[in-house]
Image (cartoon, grey):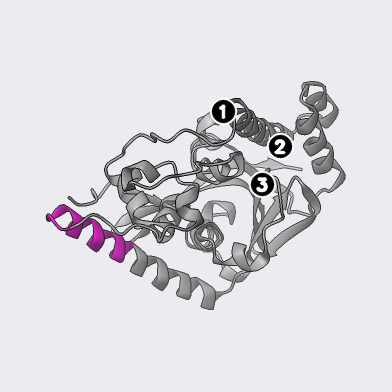
Amino acid sequence: MSLPASFAFSQASLQDYVDCPRRFQLRYVERLAWPTPVAEPMLEVEAHLARGLDFHRLVYQHALGLDPATIGESISDAKLAMWWEAYLSHPLELPERRFPEIGVSTSLGGHRLVAQFDLVAAAPGERLVIVDWKTNEGRRPRREWLAKRLQTRVYRYVLAQAGQRFNQGEPVDPSWVEMIYWFAAFPAQPERFGYDPAELEQDRGDLEALVGEIEAAVAQAGSGAAGLAQARGDATCRYCRYASYCEREAGAATADDLEGQADEGAPGAGFDLGLEQVAEVEF
């Protein structure tokens, strides 16, 4: 068993491996279905995920230049309307050129590393900003936690490595890159992460080492050795929908837990957008 050369890594797959190598194996190598039911009522979970996707669609339409009042008229859900109002009343100061819902990839350890950005705002030669819209509820994530997440590291790295199309075809200076998390539940408290050449080199080394570790672990599992290691049985297992494969009980995921796992497939997959399908939007 080995990863095919065509296997593309993402922040989600890398985070799965870091959280639980066994989950990476089940989800991405063996591609098994999730057998464990969701803990919260299924309708509530589905409604939360659908609402998050709807919010991304609203922001996408706005980025394309649609009138916000017209967009607002299409909203019938009270919470979605609250998020939309929060978005309009707390605008981010961003460069004028906007690329909503766009994917970018770069090479990493013989594979592709892909990132699906909610928005890239560009001022060529000056500033390239990634914006990620978060609609999860509950407590606002701590900066220290966000800084360690693979999403923060992968997204900035990919843009710095492969963001030439946002910079008039020229290489990107890592110091121009910034990532902003915007929280619908905390619209006045976005979290910002800059970047620099030293961080890029650190990320390159760490990500290449992580991919190498994954390849070695998958190959070892395929040679007849035991499967990839399981998590220790903490909250990672409690909210894992693969827990029954490990003979562990799971409280199964809440809506917030599932939102992070949907990042790579939604909204981008919902829009079916590719690199060449989204033109820049200038405000």
Measured Cα–Cα span from mark 3 to mark 2: 12 Å
Badges 2 and 1: C-beta atoms under 8 Å apart? Answer: no
Dot 3 falls on a residue whose secondary structure is strand
Residue depicted at 82% across the width and 31% down the height: 68
- Rendered-image quadrant of the C terminus: top right
Front tag of 3 and 2: 3
- Residue 180 to residue 90: above or below: below
Residue 91 magenta-drawn? no
Kindly report which numbered mark, 1 or 3, lies closer to the viewer in this rendering: 1
Task: Determine the CA span between mark 2 and mark 1.
Answer: 26 Å
Q: Which residue is mark 3?
A: 134
Of tags 2 and 1, the one toward the viewer is 1
Q: Earlier in the sequence, mark 1 or mark 3?
A: 1
Residues 84 and 117: in front is 84
At horizontal 82% and vertical 36% (from top left) the residue drawn is 82
Q: Which residue does the image show at 80% across and 50% down from the upper left?
A: 187
Q: Which residues are magenta?
A: 211-225
Identify the disc placed on residue 42: 1
